[in-house]
Amino acid sequence: MKLKIKMLALVGLGVMLAPQLTKAQNPIITDVFTADPAPLVYDDTVYLYTSHDTASVSSTNYEMKDWLVFSSTDMKNWKNHGPKLSPKDFSWATGDAYAAEVAERDGKFYFYVSTFHKDDDRSNGGAAIGVAVADSPLGPFKDAKGEALIYNEMTTDNPHGWDDIDPSVFVDDDGQAYMYWGNGSLKMVKLKDNMIELDGEIHYYNPKNFIEGPWVYKRKGLYYLVYASKGEERERVEYATSDSPEGPWEYRGILADSAPNSFTIHPGIIEYKGKDYFFYHNGVLPTGGSYRRSITVDYMYYNEDGTIKKVEQTEEGVKAVE
């Protein structure tokens, strides 16, 4: 497997069916192959934005053509809303639909995506991050900027052209928005109030064992940086904490071991109706694997000092909540 393929944290598969209800178990989505979970709690509903693995059983690379959306009000039954955005919706983009995340602000929903940039007057190609916007968590989403928010020539700390992937956007209590992303190193930049423009310079970090897939959130005054890490032979999940969204980040340890039958793993964390949930992907569905992944969810528990207990990956998953 080429290093480039190994390092990308990407997206899910299958023939799309009409919106339907599916019984949740691990994996929680079984009618299509999904990856890179990005859960969002809004209006008492969990919206789950995912990559979409469409590679064949014999494929030796990722094939991901769009981003999918699911929703649930009980963490057990998930409604499939189908594809809501693809790289084709961005005039500057080309290639596949890698990991993405949606952030809500003032009733608008900003869909931050990673894909590749066309070779044109602005960029020579390479990974890039774009942003689409909608008035509903289900879209329709449209390119909010008309150009990439981040493209390869804007970051120079890594020589490879696929380091600008996996955006994670966090809005702090004071209203300041931050975007984190990267492969091989963690990058961070402030966003303006409009959520589609950078506000200042890009900052670079090197958390212990960091590979990609950052997820940033705040709990009880403490900032958490959770990410896909080097692991032994496959990615696992590790995390760090800070008193500031700008770091420095204190390494805290391993949060989750490598996922079964998948080189990659990708975290997404929420609190919903009084419980904490850890989303990730594995390759355990029939004909599944590293290029045909499936999203799962398990409970997550905190210690009194704010550190997180290691997540137990289960087949049972989580129970329905009222």
Image (cartoon, rainbow, N blue to C red):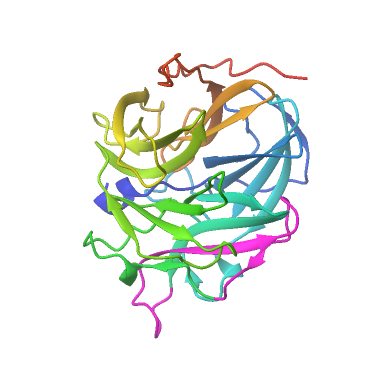
Q: Is residue 240 left or right of residue 65?
A: left
Please identify the residue farthest to the bottom as the structure is shown: 121
Q: Quadrant of the C terminus?
A: top right
Is 269 placed above or below 12 here?
above
Dividing the picture into quadrants, the one containing residue 108 is: bottom right
Residue 5 in sight from this viewpoint: yes
Please name the predominant secondary structure of the magenta segment in the image.
Answer: loop
How far across and down, in percent of the image, does residue 17 sit?
A: 73, 46
How far across and down, in percent of the image, does residue 281 sit?
A: 49, 33
Q: Residue at x 48, y 40 (%)?
A: 292
Front-lying residue, 65 or 151: 151
Residue 102 lies in magenta, yes or no?
no
How far across and down, in percent of the image, does residue 190 sit?
A: 45, 58
Residue 63 in sight from this viewpoint: no
Q: Residue at x 65, y 62 (%)?
A: 133
Image: magenta residue range? 118-146
Dividing the picture into quadrants, the one containing residue 193 is: bottom right
Front-lying residue, 86 or 253: 253
Residue 139 lies in magenta, yes or no?
yes
Is 153 placed above or below 131 here?
below
Q: Is residue 218 left or right of residue 207?
A: right
Dividing the picture into quadrants, the one containing residue 48 is: top right
Q: Is residue 181 left or right of residue 90?
A: left
Q: Residue at x 78, y 38 (%)?
A: 20
Q: Is residue 296 left or right of residue 186?
A: right
Front-lying residue, 178 or 278: 178
How far across and down, in percent of the image, does residue 43 sit?
A: 76, 39
